[in-house]
Image: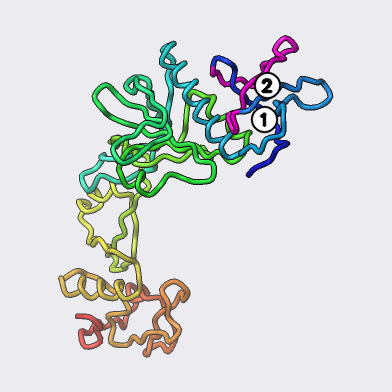
Amino acid sequence: MSNPDIQYKYALSKTGEAICIDSLTEKDRIDYECLGCGNILRPVLGEIRQKHFRHKSQPVCSEETYLHRMGKKLFMGKYKECLLFNIPYLVELEVPVFCNSCQHVPCSKDGRRKSYNLTDKFVKIKEEERDHDLIPDILLETESGEKIYIEIAVTHSSSTNKIASGERIIEFLIKEEADLEILKRNQASKFDDKIRVYNFKPQPETIHLKRFCHKEIDYFAVFSNGKCRFMACQIYKWDAIKESGGYVIKVEDKNPDIFIQETEKAFLAGIRVKNCFLCRYHAINTFYSMFKESNPIFCKFYREQKKSNFAADCKIYRPDKKVFRYT
């Protein structure tokens, strides 16, 4: 990534401040320092060509080094400004959300975006300072010793050792000079494709979302006319359905085998269930599939295909435990 003719948008002033070429005018035609190689940069402020900094001489300058060092410089400058003027520096995270509106389980819902102000607690900022066996690009720290690592990733992402340390990390992905703009903001979002966060574990929120519940319970039901079928209801309605007086059984899956098992169990439990799967005259359609075939039964009496609930109105229906498949 070395290029002697590279043009930069940022340089260092004599006071060590990061200067953007867009902020300069003719009176600012002085020498600046290159963060990539330490040599002199001069502003090109013509109106025809885009403004930029150009090296006074032609040294070999590392763009990777420039982006990494300038990224740290811009973040340090912005964060110190926030601390000095009591401006929030926000990090946006995804907070786990659980609904506890019913007695069954705390259901996991879609997470919420929530912003936290780092400058409320993290009042110390240090560059390239060793933290035990690790050296973060920038270290944010509270008075009590809590830490956040700030990493500027140009060609290398955070090491596995840093991630495995459990320390919270905010990583900025800087692949080109335009990406430096994200370091001039007083916020960082997990949802930005140029930012990654590691080891942040925001406290889950518990809320009541009964009316918006999207979780369902599958169940097998027998109706007063003897017909039976698979049903589904929102989880918070299950208690009311159980207490309604009908025969309902919660099932883990809605497949043909479970349907047949439940019809047999209901019959043996003394429930007035009338279904062709229980009848001595039934045979299962060779091409039967609960999801593709609408007539799973071949009736040996009528010699034609039927739906299994045909038995509810059939005058020759004869339940016979000898044809039961599971019980």
Q: Looking at this view, is 90 or 184 the one in front?
A: 184
**Relative to 18, residue 164 above or below:** below
The answer to whether the residue labelled 1 contacts the one labelled 2, judged by CB atoms less than 8 Å apart, is yes
Can you name the residue that lies furthest to the left here? 269
Q: Please tell me whether residue 237 is drawn above or below residue 168 in the rendered image.
A: below
At x 61%, y 23%, the residue is 33
Q: Does 51 sit left or right of 144 as displayed?
A: right
Mark earlier in primary sequence (1, 2): 1
Q: Which mark is residue 21?
A: 2
> Between 16 and 37, which is closer to the camera in this rendering?
37
Residue 323 disc label:
none
Which contiguous range is marked in magenta? 16-38
Residue 303 x %, y %:
42, 89
- Rendered location of residue 161, percent (x, y): 35, 47
Residue 104 part of the magenta-drawn span: no
**Mark 1 lies on residue:** 8
Q: Amino acid at mark 2?
A: Ile
- Does 27 lie within the magenta span? yes
**Local secondary structure at mark 1:** loop
The answer for how far apart the CA atoms under marks 1 and 2 are is 8 Å
